[in-house]
Amino acid sequence: MGRNRKHTILIACLALLLGAVTAEAEVDSTLRPLNPQSMGQGGCPVASAEGFDALLFNPASFASPDGSFTYYASSFWLHADPLGALLAVLDSGSSSFDNFVDEQIPSGGFGFGSADGIGYVGRGIAAAVLMNIDAYLWGPLGSAAGDLIFTLSFISGFAYPFQLKDATLTLGFDIRPMIRIQAPINEAVMQDFLDSLSSSANPLATLNGQPALHGLAVAVDFGMIVDWGTVRWGLSVRDFLGTRFQYKQDPFGDVLVSLRDSGGFPTGGTAVDNYVVPMDISTGFAYNFLRGRSKTVSDFVVHWAVCDVITTAMEQKAPTAMLHAGAQLELFNRLALRAGFNQGYLTFGLGVKLWVLDLNMAYFTREMGTLTASRASPGFTLEAAIRR
């Protein structure tokens, strides 16, 4: 059987699996934060994520014996060539950054995002609040289009380990009530937004007249981890049976005014209820070489994963878009070196712990678009967090 036929059969089977849930529905974004810890080591540590990262990948990791309290974490990422962006910012020419953006939009796209959160994860429980925003624009100059999406998530979860002779089986789940706003953007909106950042203008004012979707949803995630010595296998099912947002549509400015004045969304907007975040499945292995047996090297973990299987099939991306691999080397419990492959592209990152302050950064590349219109989108992400 040829490779193309196998790929077609896989897509058909997965499409049937979600057919009842996503029929006649628009595929909504998962909008997973691009935090440096995961992106630096290949983008999907489904079997090895711990602490705050477990909220993004596998709820079974909530059972970690070491609890981690994140008093505040803030990250920022750029969807563009980071070196080119830095040189454009440092260039004294007034149009240098504008020219850089115009070069990025038709190639890998241009955008940015941020995430802020607090929470506790470990010893079997998780409770967190995460605020996430992402804007991305791609296409030929003059007709490029994209979205700006804001999501506020309240996450609570539980995990429990079971001893099975020489192995430990851990099962976990979480519930994620979410509030979301998304508005379409084009080149003019993006340029006005960027210009406002260097002036006293309100960056969001340029979006006031844009039609925005706003609504609520509740997602459920499940996870499983099997530990056998130094080997770990992880399985994660995110957005179980699909997460459907109950959207209404109003001008973006009206949404912001309503939130400011009444703390809620406008009433009476046009109902738009055909958006769904598809259920997705990820699985992978991790191997820990040391487990604390060295005073110099605190930890050395490598992992492999096949992630976002259903979304990759539904969007007809190449099978390589599911593949992830990475490693993290931690020295003296203070310095973390990370590297990996995200969808076939090299990633690397660095982390430093200064008492309760964590500083992390990573360079990555992601495969965007479909199989027929794929593009490599480089990026860079930074995080500062206060953790205990």
Image (cartoon, grey):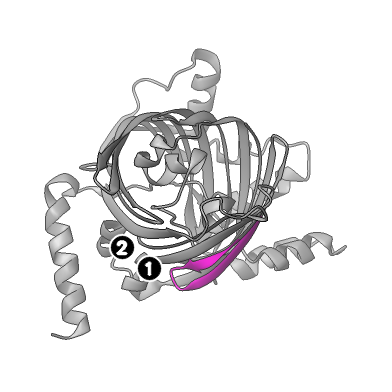
Q: Residue at x 52, y 63 (%)?
A: 327
Q: Nearer the viewer, residue 273 or 289?
A: 289
Q: Pointer 2: residues within 10 angstroms few (<14), some, or many (20+)?
A: many
Q: Quadrant of the C terminus?
A: top right
Residue 43 in magenta? no
**Extreme residue toward the bottom, this view:** 2
Give the residue type at disc 2. Answer: Thr
Could you say whether the residue bearing mark 2 is in a helix, strand or loop? helix
- Image disc number at residue 163: none
Q: As displayed, is residue 283 above or below residue 72?
A: below
Is 343 colored magenta in this rendering? yes
* Disc 2: which residue: 312
363 sits left or right of 52 in the view: right
Relative image position of residue 204 (x, y in whole percent) = 61, 37
Q: Picture quarter containing residue 383?
A: top right
Q: Position of residue 270 (x, y in %)?
A: 31, 31
Task: Tell me residue 3's x, y (percent).
Answer: 21, 83
Magenta portion: prevailing SS class: strand
Amino acid on which disc 1 is placed: Ala
Which of the 4 quarters of the picture holds residue 223?
top left
- Circles 2, 1 touching at the beta carbon (< 8 Å): yes
Is 247 situated above or below 149? above
Q: Which residue is mark 1?
A: 321
Identify which residue, 206 or 45, lies in the foreground: 45
First-in-chain label (2 vs 1): 2
User: Which segment is the magenta one?
Assistant: 338-350
Who's the residue at 41% across and 58% down the image?
Answer: 286
Between the C-alphas of marks 2 and 1, the distance is 7 Å
In the visual, does 189 lie left or right of 18?
right
Crowd band around label 1 with a 10 angstrom C-alpha radius: few (<14), some (14–19), many (20+) = many
